[in-house]
Image (tube, rainbow, N blue to C red):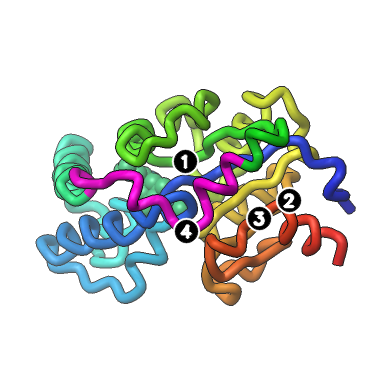
Amino acid sequence: MVKFTDIKGFVFDLDGVITDTSRYHAQAWGQLADKLGVEYPGLGDAVKGISRMDALEMILKKGGLAGNYSAAEKEALAAEKNANYVQLIQNMSAKDILPGMADFLADLKAKGYGISLASASKNAPTILAKIGLSDYFTKAVDPATLQYGKPDPEIFVKAAQLLDLMPAQCIGLEDAAAGIAGINAAGETSVGIGDAELLHDAAINFTETSQVTLANIEKAMND
Ligand code: BG6
Ligand code: MG
């Protein structure tokens, strides 16, 4: 069992952890699903943490359309979703940082913990710049270099490597079930943020980002 004192670094998901962009992803995918005539109850939760192309495949499969599009047509559909998404994030600013996360990052930095980003989103650098948090995330896994998407542990293993740490020395923070599975498979301690039922595999669960503090994490690990 990992002790709090073993922890030296924190690996962050972005969408739904640092800022509430998951609703924009859900909205943009919803627009595309409607256009394709695909009904997908729970689409917003299903695409959380899932890469752009994998999310498209999930929607096509749900609508029984998996074999209907060429690779070039799928690229075009994914680009259309991204264009919708980019519109939705255009006016983001520091006001869109989720409650407590700016203070949490400042506290980690002040206390000398390593900080890295494990976001599947190719829009992550743009979003971090818009909300003014780029300086915390000089160490970020580039999702374009990944062979596998979440729930595979690859992104979380790489995020620990960027910090020169063993996975067991890292805590991973996630709002997606796929992300929690990846963190656990990487051998890191998982912190789930959101619905405890959805994130039942997380080692630690917080309902709200405002509960994410070093003191609360230490308490949870010692319980
Ligand atoms: C994840 C989101 O962070 O990034 C997913 O939770 C999204 O919903 C994925 O599909 C990829 O994002 P992007 O910006 O590269 O399309
Ligand atoms: Mg997320």
Disc 1 to disc 2, how far (Cα)? 17 Å
The residue where tag 4 is placed is: 99
SS assignment at label 1: loop
Query: CB under 8 Å between callouts 3 and 4?
Result: no
Which label sits in the foreground, 2 or 3? 3
Query: CB under 8 Å between callouts 4 and 2?
Result: no
Residue 131 in the figure: left or right of residue 5: left
Q: Amino acid at mark 1?
A: Ser
Q: Residue at x 21, y 56 (%)?
A: 28
- Residue 93 picture location, percent across and down: 29, 44
Disc on res. 189: 2
Chain-order first, disc 4 or disc 2:
4
- Residue 22 picture location, percent across and down: 36, 57
Disc 3 to disc 4, how far (Cα)? 11 Å
Label 2 Cα crowd, 10 Å radius (few <14 / some 14-19 / many 20+)? many
In the image, is residue 198 above or below residue 97? below
- Residue 160 picture location, percent across and down: 67, 32
The residue where tag 1 is placed is: 119
- Residue 17 picture location, percent across and down: 49, 53
The residue where tag 3 is placed is: 213
Q: Is residue 94 magenta?
A: yes
Q: Residue at x 67, y 26 (%)?
A: 163
Residue 21 visible, this orientation: yes
Disc 3 to disc 1, how far (Cα)? 21 Å
SS assignment at label 4: loop
Q: Which residues are magenta?
A: 89-106
Query: CB under 8 Å between callouts 2 and 3?
Result: no
> Which of the two residues, 97 or 116, is positioned nearer the viewer here?
97
Chain-order first, disc 3 or disc 1:
1
